[in-house]
Image (cartoon, rainbow, N blue to C red):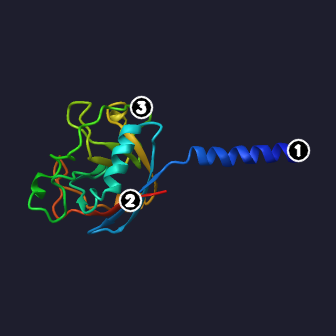
Amino acid sequence: MIKRIFSILLCFFIVSKVAFASDILVIEIAGQVSGKVEIELLEEIAPKHVERVKYLAETGAYNNVVFHRVIDGFMAQTGDVKFGLKDSDELAFAGRGGSQLPNLPAEFSLLSYEKGTVGMARSQHPDSANSQFFIMFSEAPFLDGKYTIFGRVISGQETVDLIKKGQGNNGEVTEPDYMSKVYIKN
């Protein structure tokens, strides 16, 4: 009887792991620092944002995009696929662009911004997220419920912590580190 119950529980565990398996976003970082970061995508929390990030990764749009805004003790921001390409003549405008896709409606949750949390950047309007995102260096409860969380770092936070920091209040970075390759690990 115990053997049967154990077998049933084992089957349930295997099926639930497959049914609830989430995709992993892999970011290979280059520049001053190099390394690989793996981010668990939280599709059940922010399905539209996860779908967007996966699409941009799968089409190569995030490849060679810089970390244009990096504030020590706070976060590293990247994902401007319009102006943020590493060797672009328009790099000075990084942080002002997005993709050619429409902006996304907010998908706020009760999750907290902690070290390793990944959220979508946006303007003052809650429904203005597009392609840019940020990875947290530490907790920031003042962001809770105000920016969509779509992932969390599960490997490589030590690489994130070494991303070149910017200067001043806005954290603009000269000669920034960049995402050399971004893809989905299934």
State which quadrant residue 60 falls in. Answer: bottom left
* Between discs 2 and 1, the one toward the N terminus: 1
Residue 31, numbered label: none
Regarding residue 137, the answer to whether it shows in the image is no
Residue 109, numbered label: 3
- Do the residues under discs 1 and 3 have CB atoms within 8 angstroms? no
The answer to whether residue 102 is above or below residue 29 is above
Q: Residue under circle 1?
A: 2
Q: Is residue 155 left or right of residue 106?
A: right
In this view, the mark in front (2 or 1): 2
Query: What amino acid is at disc 3?
Result: Ser
Q: How far across and how far down the image is residue 14, in percent?
A: 67, 49
Circle 2 SS class: strand
Residue extending farthest right: 1
Between the C-alphas of marks 3 and 2, the distance is 25 Å
Q: How far across and how far down the image is residue 2, in percent?
A: 88, 44
Circle 1 SS class: helix
State which quadrant residue 156 falls in. Answer: bottom left
Query: What amino acid is at disc 1?
Result: Ile
Circle 3 SS class: loop
- Do the residues under discs 3 and 2 have CB atoms within 8 angstroms? no
* Between discs 3 and 2, the one toward the N terminus: 3
Q: Is residue 18 left or right of residue 111?
A: right
In this view, the mark in front (3 or 2): 2
